[in-house]
Amino acid sequence: MTVISVIIGSTREGRFSEKPANWIFQHLKKRQGVEARLLDLRDFPMPFFDQPLTPAMPGRPAFAHPIVQKWTAAIAQSDGFVFVTPEYNYGPPAVLKNALDWVYPEWHRKAACFVSWGNAGGARAVQQLRENIVELQLTPIRSSVHIPVTTLMAHYTGGDVDAGLAELDVPAAGPMIDDLLWWTAALKTARTSAL
Ligand SMILES: Cc1cc2nc3c(=O)[nH]c(=O)nc-3n(C[C@H](O)[C@H](O)[C@H](O)COP(=O)(O)O)c2cc1C
């Protein structure tokens, strides 16, 4: 079984993010051989990173914080990721960046893609995240889903968010998941080979 985790990148009250997260999660659940998991950062209320040793320090002991340990285990158990992220001031939310920063080897050599939204489809946040995750030795794939601002605004005006997301099923979600699963399989094979 291939484990793909959908990470909900915002935690604020009234957030839009759980709608696209659930939408892409349902798509993943329909794929054969995939165990889809939803990782909500509200369930992982970690402090801002404050440790004397960096996560990348070779041979460091596990961080003691129990929620960080739970988060690290969830990343270790995953083969690939969908980051579902808003754009906050042209970048990803601090809560998501902090969640990235707490973990290091458990992210390595796994594929990741993005679902985002905002005035420019969240593209600026995704661009920053692409650069961040390369340092974590994650592999950002080419495809991503950028939700149109009309669908985001439907969330705030009582409009039909589900209908807006459904328009992205075939042109955006399907190809992105295809691509993610290809890269996830390739990297999983390479990780488990003797190379
Ligand atoms: C602190 C903050 C900064 C924001 N900055 C941007 C931005 O730079 N670009 C943008 O398109 N939207 C921006 N927005 C608007 C968000 O796209 C919108 O609030 C969206 O609903 C956020 O996702 P969420 O509801 O899941 O938190 C910002 C929102 C917040 C709360």
Image (tube, rainbow, N blue to C red):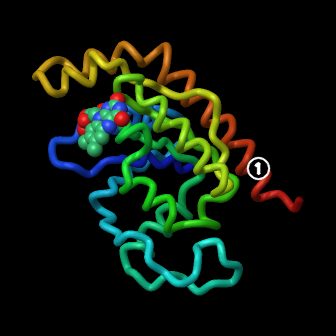
Q: Is residue 76 left or right of residue 94?
A: right
- Disc 1 on helix, strand or loop? helix
Displayed quadrant of residue 41: bottom left
Q: Tag count in the figure?
A: 1
Q: Is residue 149 left or right of residue 159?
A: right
Displayed quadrant of residue 154: top left
Displayed quadrant of residue 47: bottom left
Up-down relation of residue 77 to residue 3 (above or below) = below
Residue 80, position as x, y percentages in the image: 57, 47
Residue for point 51% across, 22% down:
174
Q: Nearer the viewer, residue 89 or 151?
A: 89
Residue 22, position as x, y percentages in the image: 32, 37
For the question of whether residue 124 can be seen, the reply is: yes
Residue 156, position as x, y percentages in the image: 15, 27
Residue for point 16% across, 42% down:
14
Q: Is residue 183 left or right of residue 99?
A: right
Location of the C terminus by quadrant is bottom right
For the question of whether residue 20 can be seen, the reply is: no
Up-down relation of residue 11 to residue 165 (above or below) = below
Q: Quadrant of ligand 1?
A: top left
Q: Nearer the viewer, residue 31 or 131?
A: 131
Q: Residue furthest right?
A: 195
Q: Is mark 1 within 8 Å of ligand 1?
A: no
> What's the residue type where badge 1 is placed?
Thr
Up-down relation of residue 86 to residue 70 (above or below) = above
Up-down relation of residue 172 to residue 37 (above or below) = above
Q: Which residue is mark 1?
A: 189
Residue for point 43% across, 61% down:
98
- Label 1: how many Cα within 10 Å (few below 14, some 14–19, many 20+): few
Q: Residue furthest front?
A: 89
Residue for point 11% across, 22% down:
157
